[in-house]
Image (cartoon, rainbow, N blue to C red):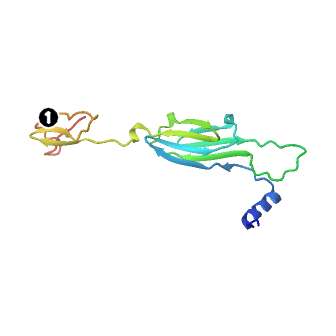
Amino acid sequence: MADFDPIRELDRFATALLGQRSGMRLMPIDLFREGDHYIVHADLPGIDPGSVDIDVDGQLLTIRAERTVRGREGVAWIAREREGGTFLRQLTLGQGIDTENITANYSNGVLAVTIPVSERARPRRIPVATDQGGDMKVMGHRNGDAAPQDLGERQGDQGAAGGQKSVSA
């Protein structure tokens, strides 16, 4: 026995009555961060890769693609659910994005857009300077970081506000 789904039947009725919808269609995406990159996966099955257009205008990333569904003459359609038309997705990018190095790849119906985080927006470790015996030392280095630096060449310099030392990198 088949289950009756009133929402699906209403959708079929509206499609039959109003015809196929026109205009832009939304493409489903997954968005995640992996290391120093954001990755967008957009489902675009049946799209001609040559129709995919990706552009950045300021902080707005726009992905547009076209799917052409070819009709067949002399056939009686039983079901026709694959939509043609233009697909569009726009994403607002934050200030910490390297918009000059965005890349894209289309494979097996999925468009992958790699959006790198700019160097200045990446998390980084800030060394803490301490005053030990009149010499300024940078503390808290780890393997791979620069070794502690002796910043004591300004020993005795009180700076503009009494008691503060000037530390220059």
Vertical relation: 18 (above or below) 4:
above
Residue corresponding to mark 1: 152
* Quarter in which the N terminus is drawn: bottom right
Q: Position of residue 77 (x, y in %)?
A: 84, 51
Tell me which residue sits at (61%, 38%) in the image.
Answer: 54
Give the class, few, some or many, for how many residues have Cα within 10 Å of label 1's Cα (few <14, many ≥20): some
Q: Is residue 62 left or right of residue 129?
A: right
Q: Is residue 140 left or right of residue 28?
A: left
Q: Amino acid at mark 1?
A: Gly
Q: Is residue 31 left or right of residue 143?
A: right
Front in this rendered view, residue 154 or 76? 76
Tell me which residue sits at (68%, 50%) in the image.
Answer: 25
Q: Is residue 10 left or right of residue 159?
A: right
Tell me which residue sits at (14%, 34%) in the image.
Answer: 152
Q: Position of residue 22 (x, y in %)?
A: 75, 51
Q: Position of residue 73 (x, y in %)?
A: 88, 43
* Quarter in which the C terminus is drawn: top left
Whether residue 94 is visible, yes or no, is no
